[in-house]
Structures are given as C-alpha cells and as structure tokens.
Amino acid sequence: MQSGQQSSLQVNLQGFTVWRICLDRVLKSGFAGSFYPAGAEELESLVKRLLHNECQPVENAVGMVVPHAGYVYSGKTAGYGFSSAPDDVSTVVIIAPSHRYPLTGETVFDVDFLETPLGKCPVDRVVANSLASEMDTVVFNEHSLEVMIPFVQVRWPEAKVVPVVLGTRPNCRKTAELVQQYAPDAFVIASSDLSHFHLLYIAEKLDREVIKAFLSLSPDRITDDIEACGRWAIQTLLIIAELRGAEKAIELDYSTSFDAGAGATQVVGYFSGLVTK
C-alpha cells in the first residue's frame, strides 16, 4: 500500500494546540494498463460506452453478480449489470474472490481510498471498521475487486465502497449477516467469472448450471461443484438477498471470451444478473 496526500489534523490538549500530519491510506491501482486503460480520458470514455443506455435501472435491486476479466473480454457483460443497477446508490459493498493472495476466510480491506486513473474512490470507513472488528483485514492488489472501481466511479460518482475479499473457505453466512448488520442499505456486488478454459460447448453447459443456481435464489445450490471463481461471493450475495426479502433474480447478460474474439478451446464465461425485492 502506498500513502496518499497529507492532511492536517488539529487537536487541542489542555490548552495547547497540536498539529498532527495524517496520511491517507491509498491503495494504488495494480491493473491499470492491463485489465483496463491506464489513461483517465480513455478509461472514462470506455466505461461510458460499456454502460448500456437502453437498460432501465431496477430501483428495487439489492445486489448483482458481474464478471471481473479485462474490459475487452467481460466489460460488455459487466456494463449490463451496472446499467441496470439502481441510480440512488451511496455505499457499494464489493465481495470478491482472492486470486493473488492465499486467503482462507473472509477479510475486509484496511484502506481509506482505492485509486484508479479516474481518481481516488473513498472507502466507507464506518462500515469497513465495523466489519474489521469481526473479520481479518488485508491490503493487496486484487483484480477481481479493482476492475469494479472505475464502473463505480462513473456510475455513482459520490458513492463509497466497502472492499470484502473472500478466501477458499469463508463463512458466507457470517459475512452476509455482518454486511446486513452494518450496511443494510448498501448495494452489494458479487464479483465472479464463470467456467475457465474449456471447449466452448462445455463452458456454456457449465455456465448455464451456475446461472440456474443463481436464478433459483437458493444459496445452498452454490457449492464446490459449480465452476465460478467467485462462487462464495455469489453465495454470500444470495444469503444477503434472503435476509433482505428478495423475491426475484434476473439474468441480464451472458457471454464468453469467444464472443470477444478469443479462441473456442480455452473459453472463460461471463455473467451479469440482479437480485430484487
């Protein structure tokens, strides 16, 4: 983690004025220039193109699943999710799987800002600190989390985020209950790609099973047997949806890396979908 800009804090102690220099804890982008453009203008223009104007926001949606590959591959499908999400969002809880660090349980990032070429996206420290009292804290660059941030910055410029990253064996119900306790009105994003590196027809079959499980709104159908790197993020979202009384899941878009111009023998699947009251 790298420190950001300095800020001054004035503290009065027994009649004396003491000035302390505080450093914002800023997590710099680790994937600008690879998963998405490094230039601010190019990135903003791309995200705006990926946000589909024909989509109507679903104002009673409580959360969504969106993919996290490079924008050239999964940006279109992710765009359907962000375009269909509610307009009035002030806090976004992003639940993402760890690819870059060996985690087992559930964690929350201990930073003040996540920085992209579009600027610094603030973390909701009230919610993050509350979660940190109940789960471990970490700081590292994770693409499944970071690729969400430019979409958040363009779609909801004033929103704060809560970065939650799950390991291989998290307690999804505990995580969901904590999110519901400390951020009951937050919009929840489950970051996940689907099957990886299969022949196209096999990928499509495997992916359809995951999508059917999501549409059932049944957390118990999200198991080790399904092929989705963010399976536990999806299960956590479905438990939160259950706690909030969600009644419907909607499929927005499905695509594969083959649709984006890659080959048909090492296919990755992408899906976006909403859960609504």
Image: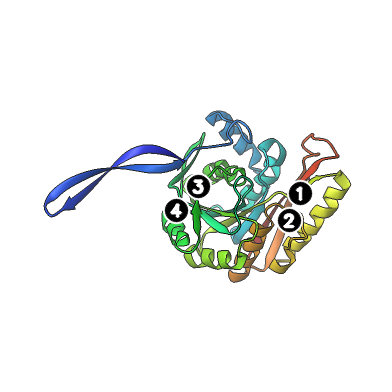
Q: CA distance from mark 3 to mark 1?
A: 31 Å
Helix or strand or loop: what does disc 4 sit on?
Answer: loop
> Residue 167: x, y in percent?
62, 55
Residue 72 visible, this orientation: yes
Amino acid type at circle 1 is Tyr
Residue 146: quarter of image: top right
Q: Nearer the viewer, mark 4 or mark 2?
A: 4
Numbered mark located on residue 251 in the image: 2
**Sequence-wise first label, 4 or 2:** 4
Mark 4 lies on residue = 124
Mark 3 and mark 1 residues within 8 Å of each other at the beta carbon: no
> Residue 77: x, y in percent?
70, 45
Residue at the far right in the pictured view = 201
Give above or below for 215 relative to 92: below
Residue 112 vs residue 249: left or right?
A: left
**Sequence-wise first label, 4 or 3:** 4
Q: Using the image as rendered, state which of residue 189 and residue 155 is in the foreground.
A: 189
